Amino acid sequence: MKIQSEQPIGFMDSGLGGISVLREAVRLMPGEDFIYIGDSAHAPYGTRPQEEIRRLTYDVVDRLLERGIKALAVACNTATGAAVASLRQMYPELPLVGIEPAIKPAVETNRGGRILVMATPMTIRQDKFKRLLAKYEGLAEVVPIPCEGLMEFVEAGTLGGEQLDAYLERVVGPFLTEDTESIVLGCTHCPFLRPDLRSFLKGREIALIDGSYGTARELRRRIEEAGLLRQGHQGSVAIENTSGNPELVRRSYELLQMEL
Ligand code: DGL
């Protein structure tokens, strides 16, 4: 079947995190219909074996394909590392983007200080991430921080407060040096924690860098290149969650509107 511009764009993540990428895509492509599936029933992905993450990702992508999507965004760093290369081979005709920790812009704007990367333990263990680090070796000090247990705060709707602060103090605190210059938010759940991260950093001039805008822009570029961009139409967003929990869907729409 020929892909038509009227078909929706599919988004997936292990849970609510990918909404941070979706919100940028909606701004850049207001004429598009989006379907987002959050796989909270199987979250977190970031502590599972690679093979399992790949299988879970395929399952969600299958659901999106059944809905007739014309393009796909894997809005999860962990799922991207595990599955995007094989998805590209499986669906060569489908405009497809993944997301990776935004180390590139952090290195390009670096003035000699330390760059921290917050990501899931699995993202950090993946070969894709190791290759990304190797690319910038010698250009900047890039230090990955495995953030097990962080996405759970966002899934639970806890975007601030004592417990989150204690988590950041314990997990990120030990890596914060005098010369830390930027923190790459290498998990799509992290941008929703920006306000709390800012207060955790107590006014220090540390840039928080995430790849959501860049990923959404790349998605638009690929859709446009394929002649599939939809304009002159009022777009829409439909969010679903594999958990079947309406509260998670409600919270997802709330995150979509959140001012960051
Ligand atoms: N949102 C996912 C990412 O960007 C991580 C959350 C998880 O562990 O499932 O890597």
Image (cartoon, rainbow, N blue to C red):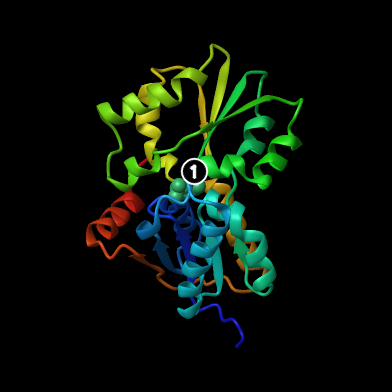
**Is 115 left, or right, of 68 in this rendering?**
right
Q: Quadrant of the N terminus?
A: bottom right
**Residue 107: x %, y % from top left:** 67, 30
Q: Is residue 38 above or below residue 228?
A: above
Q: Is 43 or 75 nearer to us in this picture?
A: 43
Give the labeled residue for mark 1: 187
What residue is at 55 percent from the left and 26 percent from the top?
182
Q: Is residue 10 above or below residue 2?
A: above
What residue is at 46 percent from the left and 35 percent from the top?
147
Q: Is ligand 1 within 8 Å of the beta carbon of the residue shown at mark 1? A: yes
Q: Quadrant of the C terminus?
A: top left
**Is 171 left, or right, of 88 in this rendering?**
left
What residue is at 51 percent from the left and 52 percent from the top?
76
Which residue is the extreme one toward the left?
Answer: 247
Q: Is residue 197 visible?
A: yes
**Is 94 left, or right, of 188 in this rendering?**
right
Picture quadrant of residue 97: bottom right
**Residue 252: x %, y % from top left:** 32, 55
Q: Is residue 223 above or below residue 17?
A: below
Tag count in the figure? 1
Q: Is 229 or 59 nearer to us in this picture?
A: 59
**Residue 162: x %, y % from top left:** 26, 26
* Other residues around mark 1 within 10 Å, as few (<14) / some (14–19) / many (≥20): many
**Residue 132: x %, y % from top left:** 69, 41
Label 1 SS: loop
Q: Is residue 188 visible?
A: no
Which residue is the extreme one toward the bottom?
Answer: 1
Query: As shown in the figure, which amino acid type bears the numbered disc 1?
Result: Cys
Q: Is 248 or 110 nearer to us in this picture?
A: 248
What residue is at 47 percent from the left and 67 percent from the top?
60
